Amino acid sequence: MDLLKFIGRTRQFEQRLGESRPRLWRLAHAWCRNRALADDLVQDALAKGLRNHAQLRDEESLHAWLCGILAHCWHDHLRAHRPMEDVTEMDEAVLVADGSPETEYLQSEIVRRVRQAVAELPVAQREVVTLVDLEEFSYAEVAAILEIPIGTVMSRLSRARSALKERLRDQNACGLAAPRIARVK
């Protein structure tokens, strides 16, 4: 009977790991900006999570635990492959408000520029800003995931947000703002 409970729990754990894959991939891709590498990092993280599932103390914190494993895999990769070049670009996400071509273009241009600015951040700042602002982890959770003090999380996040603000402001000041498209009557 205990063996059946264990098998059921293991299958449920494997299913939850599979459900975490898209969020982990999005995070890995935000960090490394390389689709193939993001796939590899997520695969490594999930394999390590499966092997070490007994170390998970609280089932409710599975995603944070997996993000911590992913962060370790990412740092291991950075140590092994210095310097790393970002090779591929992210797909353009189009946020459509009214469906007009002008709106689609302007919104996709904004998304592209924000993603580019995030990609240009130093790795440590990029990790923190993606965990807090994209994955919506608390500062304490990010500190645990990256194994850094909470004050470091806050200072990196502050520097990252300031750098993003400055980069985006500079793009607009240099005339890189999305052009206005005149409507033909």
Image (spheres, rainbow, N blue to C red):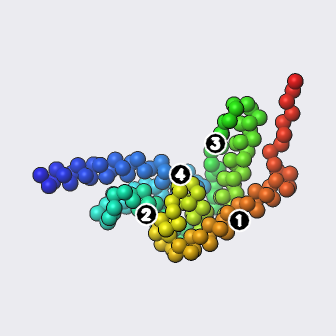
Please state which of the two labelled residues, at mark 1 or mark 4, is closer to the viewer.
1
Distance in Å between CA atoms under marks 1 and 4: 23 Å
- Identified at 69% across, 31% down, the residue is 99
Indicate left or right for 11 with 22 as reference.
left
Indicate left or right for 123 with 54 as reference.
right
Circle 2 residues within 10 Å: few <14, some 14–19, many ≥20: many
Give the label on residue 69, or none: 2
Residue assigned mark 4: 26
Q: Nearer the viewer, residue 42 or 62?
A: 62
Residue assigned mark 1: 162
Circle 1 residues within 10 Å: few <14, some 14–19, many ≥20: few
Label whose residue precedes the other's in the sequence (3 or 4)? 4
Picture coordinates of residue 28 (x, y %)?
Answer: 53, 56
The number of callouts visible is 4
Circle 3 residues within 10 Å: few <14, some 14–19, many ≥20: few
Amino acid marked by disc 4: Arg
Query: Among all residues in the image, which is located at the extreme top?
Result: 185
Location of residue 38 with respect to 156 vertically, above or below:
above
- Identified at 32% across, 64% down, the residue is 57
Amino acid marked by disc 1: Ser
Give the label on residue 16, or none: none
Residue assigned mark 3: 93
Label whose residue precedes the other's in the sequence (3 or 2)? 2
Picture coordinates of residue 108 (x, y %)?
Answer: 70, 42
Residue 120's image quarter? bottom right
The kind of secondary structure element at disc 3 is: loop
